[in-house]
Amino acid sequence: MSVARAAVRPAAVRRKVESWLAERDGSDAIVLHARPEWTDEPVLTVGDTPVRVVPCRTPLAARAALADRAAHEKLVLLTDLTDMELGDGLLTHVSMQKGRSVDPWDLVTQVFGGQVRLDSTLVRTGRWVADALTDLAPAQGWPPPAGLILTRDHALRHLAGAVLGLDPDALDGAGLLQWSTDAPNQLRFGDLPTEWSDGIATFLREVAGPVAVPVLAAVGAGHGVDAIPLGLLAGVLWPRAAESRPDMDLVVARTRLEPRFGGARLTEEQASAFGEATEAWIYRALDGDHAVRHDARRMLRRAEDIAAEIDVAGRLAASDLLPARLHAADACIRRGRAARRAGGRGSRRARR
């Protein structure tokens, strides 16, 4: 009797076909044991070879697919039938004279070069990571690990780096803040299956530290492009020299910021790290070229706008960076100059 099998992803079929064609066994068809469902294009082009994928629920459907195969095409038969149900007569016409399983972890070893063993911690991360590594693998495969063991860190660093458009070695707070300025990359992250994006986010929180929590929360809430302005405000609302018990006005001000993080309540550690990282980003940007300086000034203006929207603009004078502080300094300078001029005129009148 047929066996209940999982549906197979198009990328998994493509990888199995690539491996089969590389064997050059002279066969024209392959049986893959999987749920007989296929919603992708009926013909894949693998290299220069057209490969037709046919779901087969019965032995008769499989025989018909073999009989109807075009001479210029290879054939993939997707079926949940056992080899015994397919029968020896049919299997003599397929590669290896038997069906092949579609093991997601075998595909992972393939996309990492085929000569690696899997670290058990990677496998325990879940089936989602095997599917993601297979689906999102570059055409040339993922960079192989330095040794013979494919570790969880190596695999997830390259996966997260590819998804975020970052160097795998730049998955830190600064890298995430830079990523937050790229709206298209954020949209691609949001378009991932939820299990994939959640798993990658979990890994990023591990390797990037407390800054990752508010950045990813802002992204999840649809405010990712405001991550740097929000970090600047976090630096104001969670000041380093704050008392152990903030006053009620400060608590209310922090609460007004929470919807920008999807309702998440930042810890002191997260808010402090977030504020420091965004200030460092701004200082680096202000030392950059004209375009980067323009981005920094835009982030500062946006922080001031958000502060006005949530009615905390009065607290911006505590910042060393935000425009409100600069405006206050300018006002003090103007008042000082006016006072000196007034004092000078008074002195002259007194001398007269």
Image: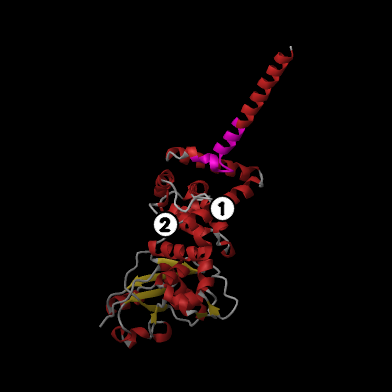
Q: Which residues are magenta?
A: 315-331
Q: Which residue is mark 2?
A: 191
Residue 85 in which image quadrant: bottom left
Q: Along the line of sight, which residue is nearer the eye, 332 or 54?
A: 332
Residue type at mark 2 is Asp
* Vertical position of residue 294 compared to residue 344: above or below: below
Prevalent SS, magenta region: helix
Q: Is residue 325 magenta?
A: yes
Q: Is residue 80 left or right of residue 345?
A: left
Name the colouring of the figure: secondary structure
Residue 289 in which image quadrant: top right
Q: Is residue 138 visible?
A: no
Q: Residue 276, labelled with which disc?
A: 1
Q: Along the line of sight, which residue is nearer the eye, 135 or 154?
A: 154
Q: Along the line of sight, which residue is nearer the eye, 222 or 319?
A: 319
Q: Position of residue 46 (x, y in %)?
A: 48, 69
Q: Residue at 50% of width from left, 60% of height from top?
A: 210
**Element at badge 1?**
helix
